[in-house]
Amino acid sequence: VLKMLAQEIIRAKREGGALDEAQIQHFVRGLVDGSWSEGQVAALGMAVFLRGMNRAEAVALTRAMMHSGRVLSWPDMPGPVLDKHSSGGVGDKLSLMLAPMVAACGGYVPMIAGRGLGHTGGTVDKLEAIPGYNTTPAPADFDRLVRRLGCAIIGQTGDLAPADKRFYATRDVTATVESVPLITASILSKKL
């Protein structure tokens, strides 16, 4: 079996090629197990930023990042399980109002929020400024809170979409935030 090399995957994307599912899975495994260096992660992020991804690549990246850790499942929730995403902003007003409103209407909102990209802090950054707010509760506590209150907002933990957590931080410092396929994969890997 031929070993896949990070530099060959980077080269393929740099040259405008489409990555196959195996190459994308190799990248995501490398994000999680550390076998891809920070420079390699940044290089692939920039190659994607400059060359883009087709739909199949974006779907494969989303799925691989989603399955890079524990995936939450809510099959027995007594109402619809919903979430929302916004592009963020300095005030971050929507999540804090919308989640309880949806819960009051019978929906359940187990929201996994992110940290800041660029100039603004993310929802998690803001919630951590509240004394006593726990953005990383144990899985059983998160489940219990969502069932009891109808909503809870937490941050990514080490086992929820860990590939996205690492890639998200790298994108922030390498000016690759605005890539639509990377934005899509990042958001949906946490939401799905």
Image (spheres, rainbow, N blue to C red):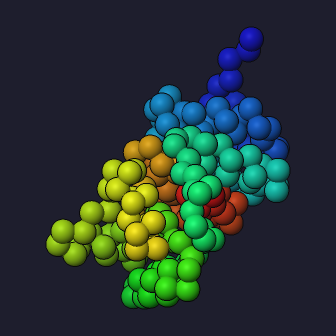
Residue 97's x, y, as percent?
44, 88
Position of 167 compared to 67: left or right?
Answer: left
Relative height, residue 112 to residue 167 (above, below): below
Between residues 90 and 139, which one lies in front from this camera angle? 139
Between residues 108 and 16, which one lies in front from this camera angle? 108
Residue 153's x, y, as percent?
41, 69
Between residues 185 and 97, which one lies in front from this camera angle? 97
Residue 160's x, y, as percent?
48, 49
Relative height, residue 59 to residue 108 (above, below): above
Find residue 180 and report its image quarter. bottom right
Between residues 91 and 110, which one lies in front from this camera angle? 110
Position of 76 compared to 15: left or right?
Answer: left
Query: Residue at 56% of width from left, 80% of height from top?
Result: 106
The C terminus appears in which quarter of the rendering?
bottom right
Position of 141 compared to 24: left or right?
Answer: left
Residue 167's x, y, as percent?
51, 50
Relative height, residue 5 to residue 16 (above, below): above
Q: Is residue 170 visible?
A: no
Q: Is residue 91 visible?
A: yes
Query: Residue at 17% of width from left, 72% of height from top?
Result: 131
Query: Residue at 74% of width from left, 32% of height from top?
Result: 22
Query: Residue at 44% of width from left, 43% of height from top?
Result: 159
Circle count: 0
The N terminus appears in which quarter of the rendering?
top right
Q: Residue furthest top?
A: 1
Position of 18 compared to 180: left or right?
Answer: right
Q: Residue furthest left?
A: 131
